[in-house]
Amino acid sequence: QVHLVESGGGSVQAGGSLRLSCAASGYTGTLPCMGWFRQAPGKEREPVASLYTLGPESDYADSVKGRFTISQDNAKNTVYLEMNSLKPEDTAMYFCAADPAARLPTYCDTDILLHFEDRGKGTQVTVSS
């Protein structure tokens, strides 16, 4: 089973930046699909970004396009989420997810990210106004 560990969360002021990391273990080779979703208190989970690492091809939620960037380090089986121009509405627990079975970029869209069974425990991001 894939084990995912997130790090890099914290508290910043609006307009600031944070870089989240997700390190994967328990998988031989490069995980084909990794991504991020978030959940704020009292709200539903929201997909944020996904990365088909074998492309690479990325996909973003409209709410973060132009501000967030997902990237990879295949040698470390790690993905990053660079978050810039942060807004208070970005405040949430951010979770990493992965799908070892994705074989095409279309199976790695943000639309299906929430269905991935392999997930981390999350890292908190708090943006103050």
Image: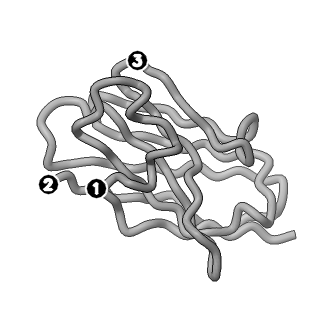
Residue type, numbered disc 2: Gln
Residue ranking furthest to the top: 55
| Residue 47 x/y as whole percent | 55, 52
Dot 2 alpha-carbon crowd within 10 angstroms: few under 14, some 14 to 19, many 20 or more: few
Residue tagged 3: 55
Q: Which SS class for mark 3?
A: loop
Image marks 1 and 3: residues in contact by CB distance under 8 Å: no
User: In front: 117, or 80?
Assistant: 117
- Please name the amino acid that badge 1 sits on: Asp
**Residue plotted at (75% across, 67% down):** 127
| Residue located at (64% from left, 52% from top) | 18
Alpha-carbon distance for marks 1 and 2?
A: 8 Å
**Three-letter amino acid code at the position of disc 3:** Gly
Q: Find residue 118 and name its label.
A: 1
Image quadrant of residue 6? bottom left
Looking at the image, tell me whether mark 1 or mark 2 is earlier in sequence order. Answer: 2
**Left or right: 82 in relation to 85:** left
* Residue topped by disc 2: 1
**Residue 89, quarter of picture:** bottom right
Label 1 – label 3 distance at C-alpha: 21 Å
Residue 83 against residue 103 in the figure, above or below: below
What residue appears at the point 34 percent right and 23 percent down from the top-left corner? Answer: 104
Q: Residue furthest bottom?
A: 42
Going from the N terminus, do you reach mark 2 or mark 3 first?
2
Pinpoint residue 112: horizontal percent, then vertical percent: 45, 46
Relative vertical location of residue 42 with respect to residue 14 in this rendering, above or below? below
Could you say whether the residue bearing mark 1 is in a helix, strand or loop? strand
State yes or no: discs 1 and 2 in contact (Cβ < 8 Å). Answer: yes
